[in-house]
Amino acid sequence: MATVSLENHISATLESQDTAQKLWDVVIIGAGPTGSLAARQLTLAGADVLLVDRQSFPRWKVCGCCLNARAVSILEQTELLEEVYAAGAVPLTEFQLRINGHSVTLPLSNSLSLSRTQLDALLIRSAISAGSNFLPEAEARLGSCTSEYQEVVLTRHTIPTTIRGKIVLVCEGLNPRLLNRTPEFSNSVDKHSCIGAGAVVALKPGTLEAGTIFMAVGRAGYVGAVLIEEETLNLAAAILPDFLKEGRPLGTIVHQILQEAGCTLPVDVERLNWQGTARLTRKTSPVADDRILVLGDASGYVEPFTGEGMGWGLSSAIACVPIVLDGVKDGNQSVVENWIQYHQHHIQNRQRWCRRCAFVLKRPRLARGLIHVLKYCPWIATPVIRHLNQP
């Protein structure tokens, strides 16, 4: 089993008590790709930013580890793409879907794979280099809101500290603990949603050819596999919850999916250390309230396939900058309305396509029929792939 190195630990840039000494322009809760990139870009634009996370970094996280063309274009736009390549990112050129021994391969362009261990650490360090302040291992909850700021209570090493931010960005990911404790927000979970699961394993050099996203579909869900840096195989699965009620281990269910699909991987998946997630498809409402904007997976999530989730998150990190700066400058009341409109037009509309894909993949017979169609008419998938990956 591949392990996450704890070398190069990312330390706090200030002490907990120091965070309460000033009124921050922006407090960002969650230092994943969305929160870290937003911190970097807002800092470069002149904002005084505090980035907070309840975890320490670097850390491993269940994720498909794919960056689609949209995400790659944003990294290039923000002059971070060279650093991503230097961290070991692997170019992706094709997507192979396999069901019941039948397969179809579709081309990909301008896509990469990189572990969240590397990507998250890279983006946090980039935010710190830009001038953002960073405080890890701090649990956050919202306090009171005034006409000038939003309070956030941070608990670090059992000691609570109340800080103030003109704008608060909630980027805490798929399981929004802070939002779940805040009555102004609701996080509704799709009753048909899959459970996420992931594992990584180191392979011998040359064991598996890099550049392909492998996806296997079975009755219990679907499994994606992609080679990331250092000859490591990253596995991410979406498992229908009914198949978990029987009490079988995650690895056994993944093995069943691969076996039904006729997909052979150079590893015994049942022996890997699988980690699960909460249900994947969910929606937060509203995505903005007075002085609070919700970004990334915390704002709503649909089971992605080739890095769409990363694209949505990084897009949000860039798009929020002018909206947030308006709010910081003069407390513009249109901040909430502008963010809701952006999210509806640019995130929710794209997520609908992933909902349709998930609908098909959860029905193996329908998916098998799709494979037959795509074998002879691959151009049918082109507009969907282009829409999901559009820079």
Image (cartoon, rainbow, N blue to C red):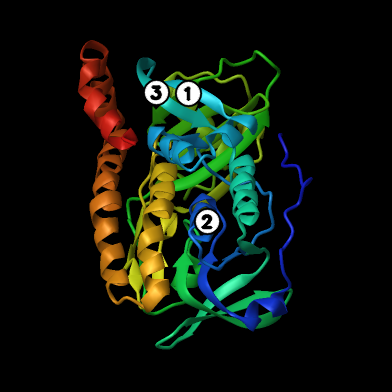
Q: For marks 1 and 3, give the CA distance.
A: 7 Å
Q: For marks 3 and 2, give the CA distance.
A: 30 Å
Dot 2 crowding, Cα within 10 Å, few <14, some 14–19, many 20+: some
Is residue 215 among what the camera can see? Answer: no
Q: Position of residue 313 (x, y in %)?
A: 42, 50
The residue to which callout 1 is attached is 92
Look at 43% across and 39% down and name the residue there.
Answer: 71
Q: Position of residue 11 (x, y in %)?
A: 74, 59
Look at 56% across and 15% down and name the residue there.
Answer: 209
User: Which label's residue is closer to the chain start, 1 or 3?
Assistant: 1
Tell me the amino acid under the disc marked 1: Leu
Tell which tag, 3 or 2, sits nearer the viewer. 2
Tell me the amino acid under the disc marked 3: Ser
169 or 102: nearer the eye?
Answer: 169
Q: Quadrant of the N terminus?
A: top right
Q: Are marks 2 and 1 in contact (CB under 8 Å)?
A: no
Tell which tag, 2 or 1, sits nearer the viewer. 2
User: Which label's residue is closer to the chain start, 3 or 2?
Assistant: 2
Indicate the quadrant where residue 266 lies.
Answer: top right
Does residue 299 appear left or right of residue 231 in this picture? left
Tell me the amino acid under the disc marked 2: Leu
User: Which label's residue is closer to the chain start, 2 or 1?
Assistant: 2
Label annotation for residue 109: 3
